[in-house]
C-alpha cells in the first residue's frame, strides 16, 4: 500500500483532481435521476427518504437525519415537501407524544416500489460501455475512499489557522 501523498499542493489543479471528477459524476447522476423521477413527482434528493422509510431503516425524522447525515432543519423541510405531495404521513407516537412517526402513504409506497427500476435504468445508462469488472473495480475503489479516516479524525491534514 502506497502512503506517499498523491497530490502536490504546488501543482494540484481543479480539472485533474479526484474531487472534481467525483463532484461532476454526482452532478450528472443527479440531473439524469431528476429527469427520470419527474413523472413520479420526486427528486433525487427525496428518494433516500422514500427508500429509508420503505425499507424500515428509519421511522422518525431523527432517525432519517442520522442515517442520511442531514441536519434536522433540512430534514423537516424535505418531509414538509414530501407530505405536501402526498408521499409521507406524520403522526404522533402513541407511546411518546413527543416523537413524530413517519410512514409512506399509498402513493409513497407505490413510488418507492418503482424506484429500483428507475435507479437501475439511470445507472445502466450512465455506465454504458463499462464491464462488470470495471464497475466492481470502481465501486471497490470508491468504498476504499469512503472507508478512509473521517476528516475530524485527520491529525495529518493541515489547516491554515489564519483562514477565516
Image (cartoon, helix red, strand yellow):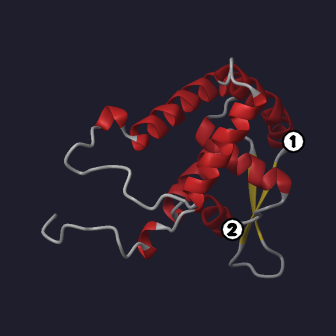
Where is residue 31? Give x, y as percent: 54, 26
Q: Is residue 38 above or below residue 60?
A: above
The residue drawn where x is 77% and y is 30% is: 132
119 or 4, nearer to the observer: 4
93 or 23, nearer to the observer: 23
Q: Is residue 93 left or right of residue 67?
A: right
The residue drawn where x is 64% and y is 53% is: 143
Q: Which mark is residue 77?
A: none
Q: Is residue 88 left or right of residue 66?
A: right
Report the quarter where the C terminus lies.
Answer: bottom left
Cβ–Cβ under 8 Å for marks 1 and 2? no
Where is residue 140? Give x, y as percent: 67, 47
83 or 22, nearer to the observer: 22
Label 2 neighbourhood size at 10 Å, few (<14), some (14-19), many (20+)? some
Label 1 neighbourhood size at 10 Å, few (<14), some (14-19), many (20+)? few
Q: Secondary structure at mark 1?
A: helix
Where is residue 158? Give x, y as percent: 27, 68
User: Which residue matches tag 1?
Assistant: 106
Where is residue 103? Give x, y as percent: 80, 56
The residue drawn where x is 59% and y is 42% is: 45
Q: Nearer the viewer, mark 1 or mark 2?
A: 2
Q: Which residue is most to the left?
A: 162
Q: Secondary structure at mark 2?
A: helix
Q: Is residue 145 left or right of residue 84?
A: left
Residue 121 appears in which quarter of the rendering?
top right
Report the quarter where the N terminus lies.
Answer: bottom right
Confirm whether residue 83 shows in the render: no
Q: Which mark is residue 63?
A: 2
Q: How many marks are shown on the rendered structure?
A: 2
Between discs 1 and 2, the one toward the N terminus: 2
Amino acid at each position: 500500500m502506497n502512503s506517499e501523498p498523491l497530490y502536490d499542493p504546488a501543482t494540484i489543479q481543479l480539472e485533474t483532481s479526484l474531487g472534481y471528477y467525483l463532484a461532476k459524476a454526482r452532478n450528472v447522476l443527479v440531473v439524469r435521476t431528476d429527469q427520470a423521477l419527474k413523472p413520479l413527482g420526486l427528486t433525487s434528493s427525496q428518494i433516500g427518504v422514500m427508500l429509508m422509510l420503505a425499507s424500515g431503516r428509519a421511522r422518525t425524522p431523527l432517525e432519517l437525519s442520522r442515517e442520511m447525515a442531514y441536519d434536522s432543519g433540512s430534514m423537516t423541510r424535505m418531509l414538509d415537501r414530501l407530505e405536501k405531495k402526498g408521499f409521507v404521513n406524520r403522526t404522533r407516537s402513541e407511546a411518546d407524544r413527543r416523537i413524530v412517526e413517519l410512514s409512506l402513504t399509498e402513493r409513497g409506497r407505490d413510488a418507492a416500489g418503482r424506484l429500483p427500476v428507475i435507479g437501475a435504468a439511470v445507472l445502466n445508462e450512465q455506465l454504458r460501455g463499462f464491464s462488470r469488472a470495471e464497475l466492481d473495480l470502481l465501486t471497490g475503489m470508491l468504498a476504499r475512499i469512503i472507508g478512509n479516516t473521517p476528516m475530524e479524525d485527520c491529525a495529518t491534514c493541515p489547516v491554515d489557522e489564519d483562514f477565516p
